[in-house]
């Protein structure tokens, strides 16, 4: 509210400290009140900061901050000045006078509302003034009436309450130590709230405990409270997903020695000669050399992954339903059931910011101030088109980066095959996979920062009408760009790599002689798993955690380097500062969008490709345990306390989560069907296997190629690399033999497997979607005890209304039956029981 009314006012902090106060005790004397006005009685509730305008020499200047008169000597001639410079100074002076006028007007409006103000311009920070604000009790009561805050009604102890009480006693060690008698005073003694939040929330030693959501809401407001409540529910729901994912991975480890296809690949008696992996530089190779890759692929590509994909789809549905119930409970407890967010038209304010952002002339800014601005669709159309084309170009840049990494993999693989160093030729696939995944990670982290700034710039160009519209448009743009940035390499590995490579003698080439990438014999699932693992862990460790810890410390170190004081002088100087002066040096609060975006991208990693990486929920759980305490410490000690904002839900983020959970079903269906070998194994076992087992599956997946059919200039330079002359080599595909009537055409087995793959996608998608919808229908959105309590409150309100009406009727009857000559007695005042 303050920033919209006065743009040069910056709300930086409340009076409460961000640093732990070890001297703060909860003794019998009661909690300490914290910073006060100079009278030592009135508590400081909020502090605003502003810049103090310094007087300019050789001119007369009268301001709100003082009367500065510096006059020239009569004998000194006035200096000559450029007319353009003089006009520019005149505009600046007019701008400063207007700012001071608006500041005075703003302060008068605060006083008219009943708030008490006190200025502090004699502080130890030059050029900065502080405006202390105190809200008297009558103002708080009045605003509570305007906001229609309700006191909780008396609850009737029933079976549900007894069960909840028993569960709370059983889980008492997991709850933060916030005593009820101390929690009642949190709203009026925020200094104590900050200390308790630091001890019971922002400490890594309490990672196993629940968050004090009620206290977070009282100190930071409902909007931030809902974020941490959602993050807590998400982290709790990751526990069963992480356990099941770990079991699926352990199942793969336990059954790898019994996997028949892996045993056939690793069996040295199967003398299978494979075709070269690249032109000229690569030679023929033995299938048994892919033994390690085949065994590693079985850890993630086994029948249990299908069950886990179904489980995660139902998990996502249960998570959404559980959050809706939790959100409804918080809405009831926090008295948000009837709250409707007010959308204020701030077009003019945003236009002012845009003008300042692009350094437009002050005349244009004044025009926007003095006239009511209404932008039509025609006015906004250029900004919309600019945003659309810019986003399309940026998505194209993302695809170009992915293609660049593809070229890197192709070229580096050929270079390693041509290397004379035996060490470089030992494990070429692992080297190429690992380095390419790291390069992708670095590019993703860099482009994330670029896309975040670009999305904000594009949203500013559109000049949205309300704050909510601005936030939603910014979120959508940021999500589209960052989602494409993070998932483009993964989508390529899952659905495109190895699909358009051709065959020996007729390969597909890009940019001249670069041959398209092939999957390993065990499929692309292992490479997809490596890419997911490195991207997920890298983003969480580097971008989410190290950046949040390291960047504030680097900024603090830079400030110390720029300061003229040494460490001891800096410490002595900090000891002399008041609390609101210390908070002035804290970082600004940039909103919840970056925090939500981290978790939304992580949710996509957990759900979209979980069939290829069942350990993703476990890594997400470990990250979130640290993330909660890291965010808590940042909010309590690193950034200025934000203005409390009311909200009844998490907004557009819920729709994004809902959409991702639906898309995850389709993506996992295609991953299981087309990326893994699950469908080819089933088709072979039940249609082509002579004994109904998996024996012979590897040979069934390999086609034959006559080396005499190589195109000129593509045959291996060292055809005798294996010690004998090769006439027929094998490659993974379903094609006809060279000696058939239609050599190298797609075989009937290929079309049968393709039909089964498509059928599996349709069946899996519809069955899982139906099960998810059944879960949505089965679990009510409103908890039973909350719905009963709301029903009881309605009954109590009706009874109270009926009693008041009966009292009024009796009073009217007594007045009408009273004799005119008889003196009337004064009726007793009636006060409703809920006042």
Image: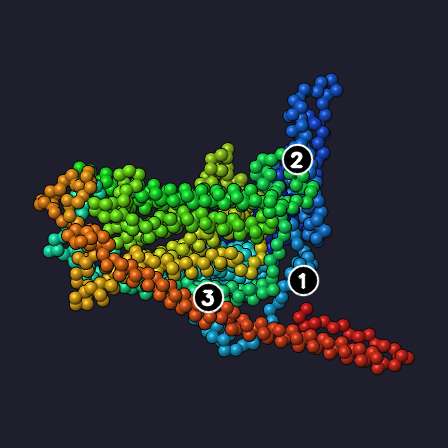
Where residue 545 sits: x, y (%)? 41, 49
Task: Indicate whether 793 appears above or below 698.
Answer: below
Q: Earlier in the sequence, mark 3 or mark 1?
A: 1
Q: CA distance from mark 3 to mark 1?
A: 32 Å
Q: Earlier in the sequence, mark 2 or mark 1?
A: 1
Instruction: Tell me if mark 1 has few (under 14), some (14-19) or many (20+) residues whose alpha carbon lies within 10 angstroms of its own.
Output: few
Q: Are marks 3 and 1 in contact (CB under 8 Å)?
A: no
Nearer to me, 614 or 477 = 477
Q: Earlier in the sequence, mark 2 or mark 3?
A: 3
Q: Residues within 10 Å of mark 2 (few under 14, many from 20)?
A: few
Residue 769 at x, y percent in the picture: 41, 65
Colour style of the rendered protein structure: rainbow
What distance separates the C-alpha of mark 2 from that of mark 3? Answer: 54 Å
> Which residue is identified by label 1?
145
Q: Is residue 664 above or below residue 826?
A: above
Q: Residue furthest left?
A: 724
Location of residue 753 (image quadrant): bottom left
Read off the residue under disc 2.
363
Instruction: Give the SS element for disc 2.
Output: helix
| Rendered location of residue 20, percent (x, y) | 50, 51
Residue 322 disc label: 3
Q: Is residue 832 visible?
A: yes
Residue name at image x 60 percent, y 55 percent:
33
Of 191 and 331, which appears nearest the observer?
331
Checking the image for residue 265, the label placed there is none
């Amino acid at each position: 509210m303050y920033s919209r009314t006065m743009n040069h006012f910056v709300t930086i902090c409340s009076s409460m400290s961000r640093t732990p106060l070890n001297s703060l005790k909860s003794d019998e004397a009661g909690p300490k009140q914290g910073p006060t006005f100079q009278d030592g009685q009135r508590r400081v509730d909020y502090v605003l900061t502003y810049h103090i305008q310094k007087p300019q020499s050789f001119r007369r200047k009268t301001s709100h901050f003082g009367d500065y008169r510096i006059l020239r000597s009569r004998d000194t001639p006035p200096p000559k000045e450029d007319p353009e410079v003089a006009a520019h100074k005149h505009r600046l002076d007019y701008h400063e006078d207007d700012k001071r006028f608006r500041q005075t007007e703003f302060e008068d409006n605060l006083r008219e509302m009943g708030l008490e103000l006190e200025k502090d311009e004699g502080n130890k920070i030059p050029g900065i003034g502080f405006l202390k604000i105190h809200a008297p009790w009558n103002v708080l009561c009045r605003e509570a009436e305007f906001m229609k805050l309700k006191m909780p009604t008396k609850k009737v102890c029933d079976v549900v309450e007894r069960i909840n009480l028993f569960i709370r006693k059983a889980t008492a060690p997991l709850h933060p130590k916030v005593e009820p008698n101390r929690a009642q005073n949190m709203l009026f003694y925020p200094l104590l709230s900050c200390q308790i939040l630091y001890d019971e929330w922002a400490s890594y030693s309490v990672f196993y405990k629940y968050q004090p959501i009620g206290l977070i809401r009282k100190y930071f407001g409902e909007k931030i409270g809902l974020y941490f409540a959602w993050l807590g529910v998400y982290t709790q729901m990751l526990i069963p997903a992480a356990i099941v994912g770990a079991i699926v991975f352990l199942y793969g480890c336990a059954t790898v020695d019994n996997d028949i296809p892996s045993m056939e690949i690793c069996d040295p008696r199967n003398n299978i000669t494979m075709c070269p992996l690249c032109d000229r530089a690569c030679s023929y190779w033995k299938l048994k050399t892919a033994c390690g890759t085949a065994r590693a692929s079985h850890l993630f590509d086994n029948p249990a992954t299908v069950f886990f994909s179904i489980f995660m789809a139902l998990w996502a549905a249960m998570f959404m339903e559980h959050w809706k119930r939790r959100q409804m409970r918080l809405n009831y407890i926090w008295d948000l059931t009837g709250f409707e967010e007010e959308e204020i038209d701030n077009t003019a304010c945003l236009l002012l910011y845009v003008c300042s952002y692009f350094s437009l002339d002050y005349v244009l800014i004044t025009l926007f101030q003095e006239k009511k601005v209404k932008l039509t669709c025609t006015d906004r159309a250029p900004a919309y088109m600019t945003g659309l084309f810019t986003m399309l170009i940026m998505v194209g840049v993302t695809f170009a980066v992915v293609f660049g990494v593809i070229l890197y993999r192709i070229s580096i693989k050929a270079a390693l095959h041509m290397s004379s160093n035996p060490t470089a030729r030992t494990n070429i696939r692992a080297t190429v996979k690992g380095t390419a995944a790291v390069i992708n990670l670095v590019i993703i982290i860099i482009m994330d920062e670029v896309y975040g700034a670009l999305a904000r710039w594009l949203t500013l160009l559109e000049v949205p009408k309300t704050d909510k519209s601005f936030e939603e448009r910014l979120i959508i743009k940021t999500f589209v760009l960052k989602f494409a940035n993070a998932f483009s390499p993964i989508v390529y590995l899952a659905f495109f790599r190895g699909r358009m490579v051709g065959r020996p003698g007729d390969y597909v080439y890009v940019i001249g002689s670069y041959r398209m990438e092939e999957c390993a014999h065990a499929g692309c699932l292992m490479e997809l798993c490596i890419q997911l693992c490195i991207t997920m862990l890298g983003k969480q460790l580097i971008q989410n955690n190290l950046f949040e810890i390291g960047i504030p410390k680097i900024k603090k170190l830079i400030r110390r380097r720029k300061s003229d004081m040494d460490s001891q002088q800096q410490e002595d100087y900090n000891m002399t500062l008041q609390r609101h002066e210390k908070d002035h040096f804290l970082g600004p609060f940039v909103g919840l969008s970056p925090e939500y975006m981290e978790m939304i991208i992580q949710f996509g990693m957990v759900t979209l490709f979980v069939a290829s990486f069942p350990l993703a929920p476990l890594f997400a759980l470990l990250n979130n345990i640290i993330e909660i305490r890291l965010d808590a410490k940042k909010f309590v000690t690193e950034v200025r306390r934000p203005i409390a904002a009311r909200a009844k839900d998490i907004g557009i983020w819920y729709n994004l989560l809902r959409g991702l959970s639906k898309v995850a079903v389709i993506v996992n269906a295609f991953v299981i069907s087309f990326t893994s070998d699950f469908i080819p194994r089933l088709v072979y076992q039940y249609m082509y296997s002579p004994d109904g087992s998996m024996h012979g599956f590897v040979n069934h997946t390999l086609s034959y190629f006559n080396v005499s059919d190589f195109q000129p200039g593509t045959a291996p330079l060292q055809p005798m690399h294996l010690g004998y002359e090769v006439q027929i080599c094998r490659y993974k595909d379903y094609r006809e033999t060279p000696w058939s009537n239609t050599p190298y055409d797609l075989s009937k087995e290929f079309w049968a497997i393709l039909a089964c793959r498509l059928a599996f996608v349709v069946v899996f998608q519809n069955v899982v979607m139906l099960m998810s919808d059944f879960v949505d229908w089965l679990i009510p959105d409103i908890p039973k005890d909350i719905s009963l309590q709301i029903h009881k409150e309605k009954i109590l309100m009706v009874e109270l209304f009926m009693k008041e009406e009966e009292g009024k009727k009796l009073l009217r009857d007594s007045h009408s039956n009273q004799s005119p000559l008889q003196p009337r007695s004064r009726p007793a005042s009636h006060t409703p029981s809920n006042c």
